[in-house]
Image (spheres, rainbow, N blue to C red):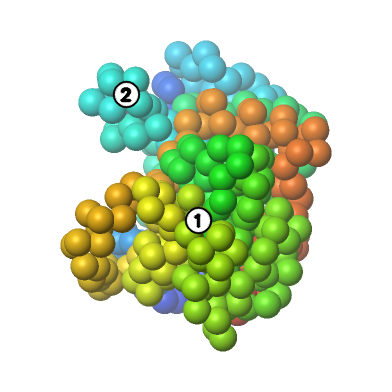
Amino acid sequence: MVHEVRGVVAKGKGLPVELETVRVPDPGPGEALVTVQACGVCHTDVLYRDGGINDDFPFLLGHEAAGVVEAVGDGVTDVELDDFVILNWRAVCGDCRACRRGRPWYCFATHNAAQKMTLADGTALSPALGIGAFVEKTLVAAGQCTKVDPEADAAAAGLLGCGVMAGLGAALNTAAVTRGDSVAVIGCGGVGDAAIAGARLAGAAKIIAVDIDDRKLDWARRFGATDTVNSRGTNPVAAIRELTGGNGADVVIEAVGRPDTYEQAFYARDLAGTVVLVGVPTPDMRVDLPMLDVFGRGGALKSSWYGDCLPSRDFPMLVDLYRQGRLDLDGFVSERIALDQVEEAFEKMHKGEVLRSVVLL
Ligand code: APR
Ligand code: ZN
Ligand code: ZN
């Protein structure tokens, strides 16, 4: 059987997205059909629309989603009918060189659905990040479904599927922030605020939020920032050092994805401290650092892909902490919108008016 549903499609470079009929096949072996309940709007969706990822138009956008399993294909045992799941883009293979070494969060051969969703005329769609969830039903690899507590609000829980997990994981997994650490986060959008929330969960003693927008700094306090720096008027490196006894922070998380903010992160950390880059740069960007400083300052310069998360380990745990009131996922949901408002949400995101707009289906 093929399901005819509505979905948000990007048809060509830079063109506004359109609501289209999408044909979704029943799940084959190893696949699951999911009724999407909520899906957050992320920068990566705009990047797909603008041709910044690749040219495989048309794209079915959306990837920060939660929903309910409607059917599973042959051989699927991990999830079943009616399970409440968060969709992930790290369905680990278990067999690549990273998985075999016991480091599946680096899996280099993650699974996606084998069958294609299509437009009404049969044109195959490329699903964003191998998911495609601005659509009433989506087809994914069963491993892309992570079962979590069904009492969780779908709009909040779905955000763990991408940006919020990236930020939380940058602090919890990549930096491994621990009790008493000083942490600075540069860039306080959804990803940076999640890094702040992660640092608080891990017991950081001082959490310094840096942004060029005072409104963002206000929001950052909600997630646990103890100090804020507006780097438009103040040198953030000097300010972070001053707030840390002249030394710099133990951990600095860069959540913008720019050379100037990366350089700030590099110099704002203490000797032997850790820098984590979770902001995504563009191909033209370069960093130029004195090699003697790279050596002489010691410590670690790390990158965090998807917060180095392992969905099966991290999503249920984080949803439980959310349900217990220890992780404010609701705070990331700035507005709830309909499927035909995605283009407007891109505009709000661009203007910095929201942490996340979430489409309810
Ligand atoms: N210095 C400090 N903060 C900055 C600067 C700067 N030079 N330039 C921008 N910012 C702030 C913005 O004001 C905003 O609050 O960085 C924040 C970026 O947040 P969002 O645009 O909401 O993006 P977010 O979803 O948080 O993602 C951040 O991580 O996953 C990647 O692709 C994503 O590169 C992006 C980054
Ligand atoms: Zn693998
Ligand atoms: Zn995303």
Mark yes or no: residue 137 visible: no
Q: Residue furthest left?
A: 291
Which circle marks residue 99 in the picture? Answer: 2
- Corner quadrant of residue 292: bottom left
The image shows residue 158, relative to residue 220, as above or below, that is above
The secondary element bearing badge 1 is classed as: strand
**Residue pointed to by mark 1:** 249
> Is 31 or 229 nearer to us in this picture?
229
What amino acid is found at the position of numbered circle 1 in the picture?
Ala
Residue 210 position (above or below residue 306): below
Q: x, y (%) of residue 198?
A: 61, 45
Task: Kindly identify the amino acid type of the residue bearing the numbered disc 2.
Answer: Cys
Q: Is residue 226 left or right of residue 13?
A: right
In the drawing, does residue 102 fall left or right of residue 201?
A: left
Q: Which residue is painted at 56% across and 51% down in the image? A: 182
Q: Is residue 130 above or below residue 102?
A: below
Q: Say which residue appears at 39% left-offset and 65% top-offset.
A: 267
- Residue 187, x across and y down, in percent: 54, 66
Whether residue 224 is visible here, answered yes or no, is yes
Q: Residue furthest bottom?
A: 233
Q: Earlier in the sequence, mark 1 or mark 2?
A: 2
Q: Residue at x 47, y 27 (%)?
A: 143
Quadrant housing residue 6: bottom right
